[in-house]
Every structure is written in structure tokens, then in C-alpha cells.
Amino acid sequence: MSAFRADDGTIISRPDLKVLDTRAMAWEPVAERENITGMHGAKRKVLVRGEQGVPSVTLSYIPPGFTVPDLPYRHYHKTVHEFAFFLDGELPCWEYESAEQQKGELVTYKAGYFMHRRPGSIHGLEPG
């Protein structure tokens, strides 16, 4: 099978192998696509979708100065593991050991950082 390059970045797509050129893929606005409050300016390229069509692996872009309208903001995933490898920039995020913790631990994710968040891990943003 010869490699080809489609408008969606597909090089090879078959049951046992998928190869994408992420450079050829268009950025999708996150807020408009998923109706997620406060994600204005955030974009993604969906690399893998689960069986129900939900994005499970993405290349994400969060613009400088990103925040959500109402702070403090806390968030967690009930069943999903979250993995992130930071390519560029910095993303301040507060990590909480439990829902009772009043002030989170600030982690500023930077280029080269890798994060694996397990289901139930609480994270968010705080004023300042």
C-alpha cells in the first residue's frame, strides 16, 4: 500500500495501522465543538476517537493568558485517565489531593513535562 496524504492528515488508515501527519490537520475550536464553558481560544487536533466517537487522544493548543470565567474552578474525570506531554509554553494548574483541600498545590507545567492523571484526580484554576 502506498502512502498518501489526505486533507485530514491521513497517511495510512487501515484496521491495523493509522498514520497521521498532524501538520496537515486543521485545528478544531474546542468550545464550539464540545460546548465547554470557558475554553475560548483553545484548539485541538483529534488523533484518536473512542468507539463512541469521543476524542481520546488529542494534540491541544491553549492560548497564552487562558483562564475560565468563574474562579476558583475545579475539575475531575470520573473514569478517564488523562495524559499530557507539554511541547511549549507554560500552563499553571492547581492540583488537589481531595475535595476538602482548600488551597491546591500550584504546578506550572512547562516544555518537557509529562503528566498522567488518574480518574478522580482533582485539578483546576485559582485566582491569580
Image (cartoon, grey):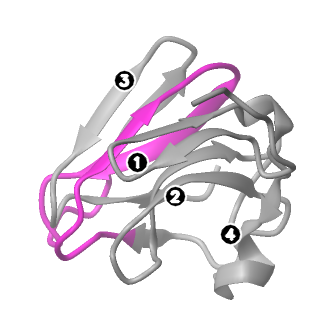
Q: Secondary structure at mark 1?
A: strand
Q: Which mark is residue 125?
A: 2
Which residue range is magenta in the image?
A: 75-104
Instruction: Report the amino acid beneath label 1.
Output: Trp
**Label whose residue precedes the other's in the sequence (1 or 3):** 1
Left or right, 55 with respect to 68, comes to left
Q: Position of residue 106 (x, y in %)?
A: 41, 37
Q: Position of residue 115 (x, y in %)?
A: 32, 32
Name which quarter of the figure residue 43 lies in. Answer: bottom right
Q: Secondary structure at mark 4?
A: loop
Marks 4 and 2: CB-CB under 8 Å?
yes
Residue name at image x 17 percent, y 72 percent: 79
Q: Secondary structure at mark 3?
A: strand
Identify residue for label 3.
Answer: 114
Q: Secondary structure at mark 2?
A: strand
**Label whose residue precedes the other's in the sequence (4 or 2):** 4
Instruction: Report the amino acid beneath label 2.
Output: Leu
Instruction: Report the amino acid beneath label 4.
Output: Val
Identify residue for label 4.
Answer: 68
